[in-house]
Image (cartoon, rainbow, N blue to C red):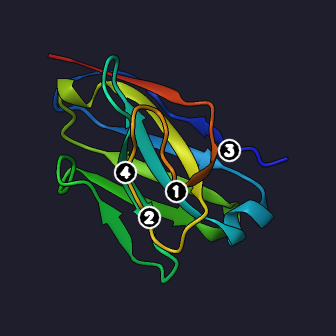
Amino acid sequence: QVQLVESGGGSVQAGGSLRLSCTTSRSTYSFYNMGWFRQAPGKEREGVAGFHSNGSTSTADSVKGRFTISKDNAKNTLYLQMNSLKPEDTAMYYCAALGTDYFLPYCSGSDCPAVRYWGQGTQVTVSS
């Protein structure tokens, strides 16, 4: 059974920083491309940042320059460093294992066709 375990969410003031972590098994980490999605209340889920099979990354325009995705292969862990947080970044953040060679951030509602497995989510709240 595939498990993605997130941590690192919380409440911060605008301008602050948080780092999210997602740990999984070696087999999952090695086989799937990994990425981060988020969903705010009343909004569609959206891709934030992720890895492609060739090791390059993709980052949503809304967070580019503020969020950085990285990974630690020795720890089977994916990270999302979030700096200069804004109230509009408030959302539930999900770690995802994708069944595609590319990080495809597209979703309809909560349905993101490229994603094979989801973590449980971690809440990020940014106050103004």
Image quarter where the C terminus lies is top left
The label shown at residue 106 is 4
Work out whether mark 1 precedes mark 2 in sequence or the reverse, and give the earlier one: 2
Residue occupying the far bottom of the picture: 54
Label 1: state its secondary structure. Answer: loop
Q: Which residue is mark 1?
A: 114
Q: CA distance from mark 1 to mark 2?
A: 8 Å
The label shown at residue 4 is 3
Do callouts 1 and 4 mark residues in contact (Cβ within 8 Å)? Answer: yes
Work out whether mark 3 precedes mark 1 in sequence or the reverse, and give the earlier one: 3
Relative to 23, does residue 5 appear above or below in the rendering? Answer: above
Q: Amino acid at mark 3?
A: Leu
Relative to 100, does residue 22 appear above or below in the rendering? Answer: above
The label shown at residue 104 is none
Q: Which residue lies at the image location 48% right of the left edge and 55% below the top edge?
A: 35
Do callouts 1 and 2 mark residues in contact (Cβ within 8 Å)? Answer: yes
Do callouts 3 and 1 mark residues in contact (Cβ within 8 Å)? Answer: no
Label 4: state its secondary structure. Answer: loop
Q: CA distance from mark 1 to mark 4?
A: 8 Å
Q: CA distance from mark 2 to mark 3?
A: 17 Å
Q: Amino acid at mark 1?
A: Ala
Q: Which residue lies at the image location 85% right of the left edge and 47% below the top edge?
A: 1
Work out whether mark 1 precedes mark 4 in sequence or the reverse, and give the earlier one: 4
Q: Horizontal and vertical percent for residue 48?
A: 34, 49
